Image (cartoon, rainbow, N blue to C red):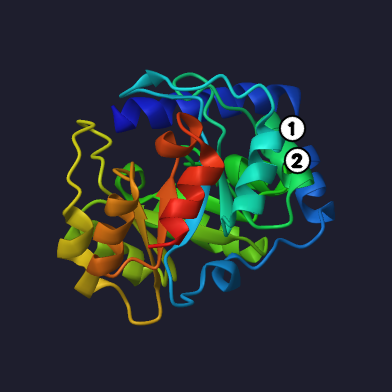
Amino acid sequence: MLSDLTANSVADALARRDRRPLDVVERTALDRAPALDALEALRPAGRVKVIAEIKRASPSRGSLASIDDPAALARLYELGGASAISVLTEERKFKGSLDDLEAVRAAVAIPVLRKDFIATPYQVFEARAAGADLVLLIVAALDDRTLRELFELVGSLGMTALVETHSADELERAKAIGARLIGVNARDLSTFELDRDLFGRLADRFPSDAIRVAESAVLSAADVAHYRSAGADAVLVGEALVTGDPMANLSAFLAV
């Protein structure tokens, strides 16, 4: 499934490139104001930080929320204490778009992550052109050469890569490229099975200077506490916020 999701995202990007060539997107990206410092925003500060996600749907759960105004939701997240906003831009299964990303970027003053299945430089330039400060790179979806090339491109554009892993081997690959913001996704994107204890098993393998992000399986304050006790510096939360009261849930998560 991960390979299908990545292939579809790349196909959609190629279609966009036919309408908006790389040189145009690259110029737009380079003309943007500098990206915000996501590492500083997510740096450990005595409590778990929250990356709050704009998420309409997922392959595993189907439709979650309509979210007619992603900018308004992002403002609520910021008001509620989120340290960054994740915007799903994948169109087919997650019902997102780059328009969502641009709207959110214009609405908030905290870092914004482009969450998608990134496998080409064009997608990285698109992210910066739309105002992203962070880009998700999924280790399992990329070979070593592509992972390193995209990681370096993200950095050259002033953005931060959130490098997502799902195993000890993938974490070693993230370390090898010098990643400083590393996520462990409790959801296996090939099977969609959840393992909420995976983060804890991998926590002691992180580089000492890396910010540790726990992704998926965060539905309650108890889940946040579980990840915090395992060493998480931040959690990425989507479903619990878009299907419930975002302000109340953020307050509960940040009180852990």
Report the residue at 60% width, 24% height from top: 67
Report the residue at 18% width, 54% height from top: 198
Q: In the image, 62: left or right of 70?
A: left
Q: Which mark is residue 246?
A: none
174 up-or-down from 239: above or below: below
Specify whether residue 148 is in view: yes
Q: In the image, 77: left or right of 226?
A: right
Residue 25: percent from the left, percent from the top?
75, 40
Q: Amino acid at mark 2?
A: Val
Q: In the image, 150: left or right of 98?
A: left
Q: In the image, 159: left or right of 59?
A: right
229 up-or-down from 135: above or below: below
Residue 34: percent from the left, percent from the top?
77, 63
Quarter assignment of residue 129: top right
**Residue at label 1?**
21
Residue 114: percent from the left, percent from the top?
57, 44
Specify whether residue 165 is in view: no
Q: On the rendered image, what quadrant is the N terminus found in?
A: top left
Tag 1 and tag 2, C-beta contact below 8 Å:
yes
Report the residue at 54% width, 63% height from top: 152
Report the residue at 31% width, 65% height from top: 228
Number of numbered labels in the structure image: 2
Few, some or many residues within 10 Å of mark 2 (<14, 14–19, 20+):
many
Residue 41: percent from the left, percent from the top?
59, 68
Of the pair 163 and 64, the residue shown nearer to us: 64
Residue projecting furthest to the bottom: 208
67 up-or-down from 178: above or below: above
Q: On the rendered image, what quadrant is the C terminus found in?
A: bottom left
**Residue at label 2?**
25
Q: Amino acid at mark 1?
A: Pro
- Residues under labels 1 and 2: Cα distance? 7 Å
Q: Secondary structure at mark 1?
A: loop
